[in-house]
Image: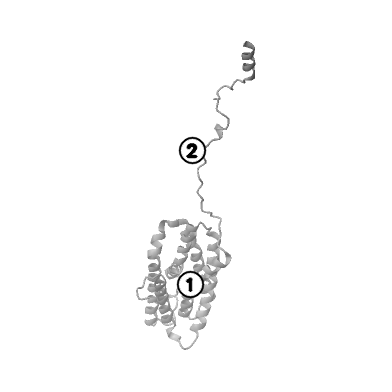
Amino acid sequence: MREALGSTTGKSRPSPPGRALCPPGLDKLPRPGVDRALAPAPSHPQPDRTAAMQPLELLLTAIALAMDAFAVAIATGVALRCASLRQTLRLAWHFGLFQALMPICGWLLGATVRHWVEAWAHWLAFGLLAYIGSKMIVEALRDQGDDRAACDPTRGLTLVLLSVATSIDALAVGLSLSVLGISVWWPALVIGAVALAFTALGMRLGRTVARARSIGQLAEVLGGVVLVGIGVKILADHGALPFF
């Protein structure tokens, strides 16, 4: 009997200290509460700020944004009649600069001002263009002769207002890039460069049109009317006019 008991106890192995005995395979059974607590928290994808627009998409966007600047440049070239190289470069530089800065501002502000931009930006652009266009028409009708310094749209406050009015849409593009998580630096550079080129081209084209004898003294009036028309077009494009 003792030998049997001794042989039996000799075959059994003592359990390691601190470890409870459990039947084989029991430790592999699912443990819902424990597994859920130990499971890693799901990761939420973050916007990739290094993403970029496709080249063709970026180019088409830049050209579309430059159309208002191009039209305003033509009107300015017509109003000046004989725009100098310095006036052309000054207008082109400011238009390109504002077109490049506005997307950056919109991207940095993000969605905080999105509602305001969508609701009021086009009205701001219309107001600025209508004011400058009306001013040009009034000054032309007063017949101030050949003194063009007082009504030069490429100088002073008028230049700043025109630059802001033609770059409002670029601010909205910056907001969209921020929401999509797309880097804004390269698009801003391309948008500014395209706007600069189109502005310079528009100024030269306006100068060519203004040299035609058919418009002569009405050049500045025509330029003012075009500016007001561009403002109305911006309102129509944003659905702000019920009859369009």
Residue at the disc numbered 1: 69
Q: Which one is in front, 63 or 205? A: 63
Residue drawn at 58 percent across, 30 percent down: 24
Residue 57 x %, y %: 55, 66
Residue 170 x %, y %: 47, 65
Q: Earlier in the sequence, mark 2 or mark 1?
A: 2
Residue 38 x %, y %: 51, 37
Q: On the image, which quarter does residue 134 sit in? A: bottom left
Q: Which one is in front, 11 or 132? A: 11
Per the image, label 1 sits on a secondary structure element best described as helix
Residue drawn at 42 percent across, 84 percent down: 218
For the N terminus, the quadrant is: top right
Residue at the disc numbered 2: 32
Image position of 180 with respect to 219: above or below: above
| Type of the residue with mark 2 | Pro
Per the image, label 2 sits on a secondary structure element best described as helix
Within 10 Å of disc 1 (Cα), the crowding (few <14, some 14-19, many 20+) is many
Q: Which one is in front, 104 or 211? A: 104
| Type of the residue with mark 1 | Ala
Q: Nearer the viewer, mark 2 or mark 1?
A: 2
Residue 110 x %, y %: 45, 56
